[in-house]
Structure formats: C-alpha cells, structure tokens
Image: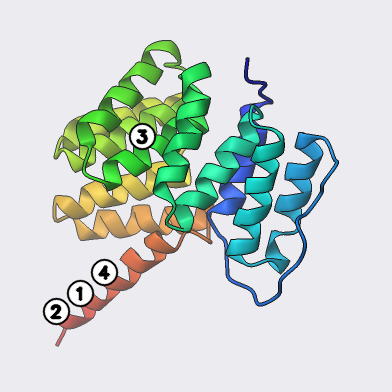
C-alpha cells in the first residue's frame, strides 16, 4: 500500500515546484540515505541553487529509492510536466491514483495533462470520480470549474467556484484567476481585471494573471488612441 503524508505537505511541494527557474551549476544527487520525507524536503529546499534538470534528476533518484512514497511521486510528476516529460508524469500519477484515486495533488496534475492534450472527457471523468469520494475538497471544485470553462459552461463554472470558496472559507488565487477568465470570456474586462488583480494579490508569483492584466491595460490604452 502506498504510504502518504498530509496533503498540505504535498501541496506545498507542488506550489514550490511550479515556480522553478534555471540556474547554472551542476551538483551531485541530494540527500542519499535519508528517509523519503527528509530527502524530499532537502531537495525542495535546495532547488533555488539547482537547475531544472538537476532537480528532475534528484527526484528521479528519490522515486527510484522510494517508489511508493506519494509526495515524492507527485513532486517528480510535477517537475516532469514542467520539463516536458509528460509520459513519465502520467506513469507516476497513475501509480499514485491506482492506490489513492482521490489524492488531490495527483488528480489536479493528471487533469492538467489530460486537458492540455485535448482529452477533456478523460479529465472530466477523473475529476468527477474524485468529487464523488471527496466533495469536501475545494481544489477539486476548482478543477471542475476549470474544465467547465473549457467546455464553455461558464455559469456552472461560477457555481463550482462558489462551492470551492465556501468550503475554503475564502477565495483562493486559483478561484480569482478562473473568475477573471470567465469574465474575460464574457467580454467583461473591468470585472476580469478586478479578479486578476485579486489573484496577483493572493499569489504575486502567478505570472498568467499578471500577463492578463498587462493585456487588459494594453487593450484599454489602444481604445484611448
């Protein structure tokens, strides 16, 4: 049976991994001989001084040594996606989800890969299956909303985001960003701008929201000419 630790840890690992930047040095694999939890923590804490390839390599060694450690598998999958190794990511995520079908970080990553490849039906089946067992997880309702947005079900997407925010007790950066996308799709740029600004306020490192704000500003400037 796959051993798991609290989702907050895996979620923190995933959040750290999504902001990777390239560096210039090469170093030996990190943390050999340590327990899986400690080794993963060390790898993540050292990431600012490592290249993406070094981080990917360290995580590959980690999952080879601990092939049933869920947070390591999820972290390896996240970096594999960022470095274009989607086949590896899917294999890692399938390993996790075969044992824990509602493991939220794995569901979100698997859905991202499936939707990105055009398999919206597969992504929807995965999210709906997870929601049946864990309707209490706001992240799953946000994933549901993102798929509804891609399916042009904008009203239903807003309702899913409302459920997510109610479960969390407040708006997340993901919810704010998706609300902005929905408003933009409806042609309501002023409302979209407010949601993107809220997203940046909640997570200043999330570049897509900042990019949408720059686009809106450029559109407004063009109209004023």
Mark 2–mark 1 CB contact (< 8 Å): yes
Instruction: Indicate which disc, 4 or 2, sits on the residue closer to the N terminus.
Output: 4
Give the residue number, with chain letter if any, for mark 4: 216
Report the mark closest to the observer, 4 or 2: 4
Q: Position of residue 9 (x, y in %)?
A: 67, 35
Q: Secondary structure at mark 2?
A: helix
Q: Secondary structure at mark 1?
A: helix
Q: Position of residue 198 (x, y in %)?
A: 43, 53
Give the residue number, with chain letter if any, for mark 3: 143
Answer few, some or many: residues within 10 Å of disc 4's Cα (few below 14, many 20 plus, some between 14 and 19).
some
Report the mark closest to the observer, 3 or 4: 3
Give the residue number, with chain letter if any, for mark 2: 223
Instruction: Indicate which disc, 3 or 2, sits on the residue closer to the N terminus.
Output: 3
Answer few, some or many: residues within 10 Å of disc 1's Cα (few below 14, many 20 plus, some between 14 and 19).
few
Report the mark closest to the observer, 3 or 1: 3
Residue 197, compared with residue 106, is above or below; it is: below
Residue 79, compared with residue 92, is above or below; it is: below
Distance of label 3 from label 2 (alpha carbons):
34 Å
Distance of label 3 from label 4 (alpha carbons):
25 Å
Report the mark closest to the observer, 2 or 1: 1
Res 125 quadrant in image? top left
């Amino acid at each position: 049976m796959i051993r798991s630790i609290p989702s907050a840890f895996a979620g923190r690992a995933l959040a750290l991994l999504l902001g990777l930047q390239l560096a210039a040095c090469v170093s030996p694999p990190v943390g050999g001989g340590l327990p899986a939890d400690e080794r993963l923590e060390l790898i993540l804490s050292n990431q600012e001084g490592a290249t993406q390839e070094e981080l990917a390599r360290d995580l590959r060694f980690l999952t080879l040594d601990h092939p049933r450690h869920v947070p390591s598998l999820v972290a390896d999958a996240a970096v594999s996606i960022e470095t274009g190794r989607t086949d590896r990511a899917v294999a890692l995520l399938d390993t996790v989800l075969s044992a824990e079908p509602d493991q939220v970080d794995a569901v979100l990553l698997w859905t991202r890969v499936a939707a990105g490849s055009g398999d919206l039906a597969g992504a929807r089946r995965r999210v709906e299956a997870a929601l049946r067992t864990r309707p209490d997880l706001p992240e799953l309702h946000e994933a549901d909303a993102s798929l509804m947005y891609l399916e042009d079900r904008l009203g239903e997407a807003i309702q899913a985001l409302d459920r997510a925010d109610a479960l969390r007790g407040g708006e997340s950066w993901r919810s704010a960003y998706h609300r902005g996308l929905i408003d933009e799709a409806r042609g309501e740029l002023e409302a979209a701008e407010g949601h993107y600004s809220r997203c940046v306020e909640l997570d200043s490192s999330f570049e897509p929201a900042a990019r949408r704000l720059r686009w809106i500003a450029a559109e407004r400037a063009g109209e004023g000419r």
